[in-house]
Image: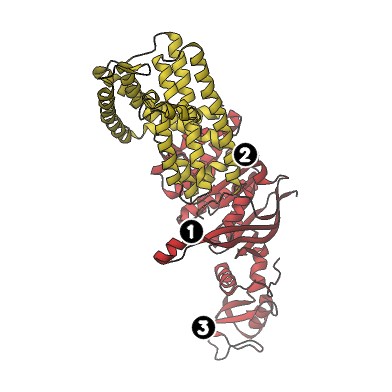
Chain colours: A yellow, B red
Amino acid sequence: MVTFWRIIKLSFLQQLTYRTAMLAGLVTNFFWGLFRAAVVMALLSSQGSVNGLDLPGALTFIVVGQAMLAFMNIFGSYELMTSVYTGSIAADLVRPVPLFFLWMGKDLGRSVVNLLGRGVLLVAVYAFFFPIQTPKSGLGWLAALGSLLLGWLLCFAWRFLVNLAAFWTPDARGVGRAAFIASQLLSGFILPLRMYPDWFVQFSQYTPFPGMFNTSMEVYLGLLNGEALLSALAQQAAWLAVLVLACYAVLRLGLRKLVIQGG
Amino acid sequence: MPEMIRVEGLQKTFRVMERRPGLRGAVLNLFAPRHRMVQAVNAVSFSLQAGELVGYLGPNGAGKSTTIKVLTGLLVPTAGEVQVNGVVPWKVRERYVRQIGAVFGYRSTLWWDLPVIDSLELLQPMYDIPPARFRSNLAEFSRLLDLEPFINTPVRSLSLGQRMRADICAALLHEPHLLFLDEPTIGLDVVAKEHIRQFVSHVNRQRGVTVLLTTHDLSDVERLCERVMILDLGRLLYDGSLAGLNDAFESFWSLKVDFAEDYADVNLPGLPAPRREGRQAVYAFDHRELSSAELIRRLLERFAIADLEVRRPPLEETIRRIYQEKLLVDGERGQAV
């Protein structure tokens, strides 16, 4: 456990050294967020609300979501894949730490930097442009943060699983791109799931993706209450268990046919 | 001495995709990929006793690194048995790697953008090293490897020699009984190499760490190892002492003589005429038939001699011949395994 915290801390410190990248990311996120907010405004201004999601809610969904983008790493990552291809995974495998938790620690440290450096800053700036809603009670905040953490874990487990494709194909980037586009769409990151047709929403419920993003945002907005809230959190937790088990099973198979490249 | 590593009939086969050239080939590759099996390691058997320092030699592609990767638990072999300290490395990798140290010379296990000390301190909780023990180990290794000047420098800014020293320290802080060094001196200058050799020799002698070392630098081997194993084309060709290697493959030694006076004829009966230059002559002789002592005695009987020097062929030369002429393959196996 101490090791896990120390890995998070090191990764946090390491990420802090990439200041230019952070600034560039911040600027890109900021303008892209404005654009997406404008699209939602255009869609909703004539209708009032869709499936219980009104304009201020939808704007908050988009804008807070935009701020969480780097934290959640919604666009996906290819680092584990790269380490398989370059053979640097060898350095991780000679250490007595489960690969899943080693990478989770690295990822979390980086995410926290992005949350503080990009997320908080973006929300603060957007607050000047848009009426950003917040949870109405302490319990609401607690549920939102819990759901966000589960969302983060789901995102991580998904990225890890996708990256494991590298054990089977000499270029898993294509697999990665397809997988991450699917998860962006079905997680409700691109547009809130409530704005999609019913059949699409229903289909998405059979996948772990809404739990990666849409659920957390709905909890944050207070759209889910009582039983619906508990059921949403339980679904996130259940999908997390499924994905973690899948990661472990696939990793086990992958390591058996691992070929360490180079030298 | 207890047995530390036992390898029996180790075999590792890789499936390599064969690419056909050209556009037509590319289309064919897509629909009907062709594979070729490459035997990286074939029927290799050996054992290491605790406390040994063994050199593992072989040309590029011989299968050295593959063996090391199997022994460190990273690869699952195609066939054969491996036991290290009583366990099968790849079956219990996470537990097993606690007891070993590994350095892959061409890649680092350190955090690239952080100061060296950060990477080293992570190892304390990772291996559950008691804090006091960790401090004293770090102090000792840091002194021996001279890490102090750059311990707060980010790894990315280190020279190769510094990085390698830091990596070796990182492989040993948890006091493993067994150390795998895969080309630890690759690309280093003479001083840095010597530094690393001294350290390896220190941990082997003082701490009794068993070391298996692969290298292309034969001075590493001459300086450190009493025993060498030579691998080529995935097969173990020789396993024995370094001296024995020389004896087995280089029967001709040379004796350089500086005469004290000018002699017209310095030939000895039964020996080919020496190469001469002024008062100097170089005799070539088969040391298995004629000892250098005997040769010197015969010379001293006949001539006034100022100086003498017996030369064995350099190890480099022997190894080069072994690789090139495949001296050990099949029939001519000498004392090889």
Q: Indicate which disc residue B31 carries.
A: 1
Q: Quadrant of residue B177?
A: top right
Q: CA distance from mark 3 to mark 2?
A: 66 Å
Q: Indicate which disc residue B279 carries.
A: 3
Relative height, residue A17 to residue A129 (above, below): below
User: Percent position (x, y) of residue A108?
Assistant: 46, 29
User: Percent position (x, y) of residue B262?
Assistant: 53, 87
Residue B114 appears in the rendering? no
Relative height, residue B251 to residue B116 (above, below): below
The residue carrying pointer 2 sits among few (fewer than 14), some (14 to 19) or many (20 or more) residues within 10 Å by Cα, namely some
Residues at marks 3 and 2 touching, judged by CB atoms closer than 8 Å: no
- Mark 1 falls within which chain? B
Disc number lying in front (3 or 2): 2
Residue at the bottom extreme, as displayed? B264
According to the picture, the residue beneath numbered tag 2 turns out to be B94
User: Percent position (x, y) of residue B79?
Assistant: 68, 55
Q: CA distance from mark 2 to mark 1?
A: 39 Å
Q: CA distance from mark 3 to mark 1?
A: 75 Å
Disc number lying in front (2 or 1): 1
Type of the residue with mark 3:
Arg
* Front residue of B240 and A54: A54
Type of the residue with mark 1:
Phe
